[in-house]
Image (cartoon, helix red, strand yellow):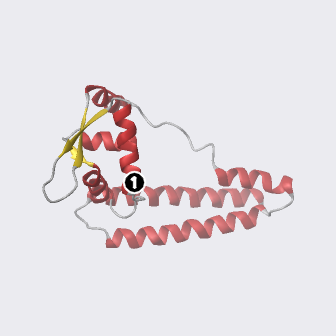
Amino acid sequence: MRLPLLALLARGPAHGYELKQDLEQLLGAAYPQPNVGQIYVTLSRLEKSGLIEGEDVEQSSRPNKKVYHLTEAGREALSVWFEDTEDEPRVRDEFFMKLALAPRSGLADPITLINRQRRQYLNTMRNLSKLAAAENRDNRIAQLLIEGAMLHLQADLDWLERCQEELE
């Protein structure tokens, strides 16, 4: 949550609730929505680490709000984040660990695990399809997020098929 908040602040100052709304609008319903408490805790940590600065703004009919802006250190951290690539393979996969250890433990059948996981992936795929149909077509970022998740799920389903062929 740290770096996405910094990225939103790169365009200009904002308060916590505004940042939450920006994330929700940008990513749509497919992305797990952060609660406002999580946003404010993260903003406090970012401020303590010098990546952002907050300023109290008086409001006449409401409690004061704190508006945050990016510091030079925050801008630098954000630049590094955008330049870094995400190349970590999915080697540490919890399901694969279950599949590998099931025969050794004698407590689970690998094919049963595969079938259960396949059902889960198919249910998730159906839910994502419903989200894609309901999502605002103008929100290309949310549509791309859903499409990426569905493509990953399809690859996982193909991989489960391969596992089943090897283990039967």
Is 20 on the left-hand or right-hand side of 147?
left
In depth, the one of 80 and 57 nearer the eye is 57
Residue drawn 22% across the image and 42% down it: 56
Spot occupied by residue 115 in the image (x, y as percentages of width and height): 68, 68
Q: Is 33 above or below relative to 40?
A: below
At x 37% / y 50%, what residue is drawn? 39
Residue bearing mark 1: 37
Residue lying at the far left of the rendered structure: 60
Q: Is residue 66 above or below residue 167?
A: above
Determine whether, in the image, residue 25 is placed left or right of residue 167: left
Which secondary structure lies at badge 1?
helix
Q: Position of residue 40 (x, y in %)?
A: 36, 48
| Amino acid beneath label 1 | Gly
Quadrant where the image shows the C terminus: bottom right
- Counting from the top left corner in percent of width and height, residue 24 is at 31, 58
Quadrant holding the N terminus:
top left
Foreground residue among 74 and 127 = 74
